Image (cartoon, helix red, strand yellow):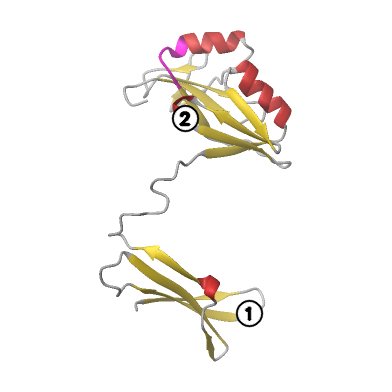
Amino acid sequence: MPDVSGDIHSDLDWSWDFTLGCDTSARGSSRSECRIGFIYGSEEHQPLDSQIWPVKNNRGKDIMLKDSKAFSGFSTEDIPKTKEFYSATLGLDVTESHGVLTLHLAGGNNVLIYPKPNHLPATFTVLNFPVKDVDRAVDELTRRGVRFEIYDLPDLKTDKKGVMRGNGPTIAWFRDPAGNILSVIEQTGES
């Protein structure tokens, strides 16, 4: 069984050594068993049952997350205001359960929006909406009260409507009520 060793030092100056061992010797099986054992003081402590888990090796066909329908999520500090924005302003299907919003997007994709009292807006684009005509989408959303971001940076310039052209796909960024950055982006063959 190959081992990976290391050490952990806590604030109390205790020194813990750990070993991670994976048994990959089972022939005809794509499963391995991994264990974490700890050595502190002069005694080696065997892993608890909770520290033993089966894993698929890279030859296995059944990777746990491969067929999982993943979804993204981000936070807001005001669920009612955010729900109103995504449903009424953007025209999306939005449901609420236990204080958490789910955006039901085209193609069967969902995005979770959860409350967070100490929310800080993302500094990157959290959600892109591919559209056939960015200018038309910007005009329509502007009529609905959306304000588009204007950038005049060396590598990022938009026009007076907030549309960036000629430096990648045509795109325009705007913010939701919590300050998270969204975009309408030129639809390509892949999107």
Query: Mark 1 or mark 2, which is nearer to you?
Result: 2
User: At label 1, which amino acid type do we have?
Assistant: Asp
User: Which of the pair 162/84 is nearer the observer?
Assistant: 84
The residue that disc 2 covers is 108
Taking the spot 51% from the left edge, 30% from the top edge, the residue there is 127
Residue numbers of the magenta segment: 130-135
Q: In whole angstroms, how far apart are the C-alphas of marks 1 and 2?
A: 51 Å
Quadrant of the frame with the N terminus: bottom left
| The magenta stretch spans residue 3 | no
Question: In the image shown, does 189 or 13 lie closer to the viewer?
Answer: 189
* Residue on which disc 1 sits: 13
In this picture, residue 67 sits left or right of residue 81:
left
Q: Which one is earlier in the sequence, the residue at label 1 or at label 2?
A: 1
Q: Position of residue 34 (x, y in %)?
A: 42, 71
* Direction front: furthest residue: 28
Res 4 → quadrant: bottom left
Q: Is residue 189 above or below residue 161?
A: below
Q: Residue at x 44, y 45 (%)?
A: 68
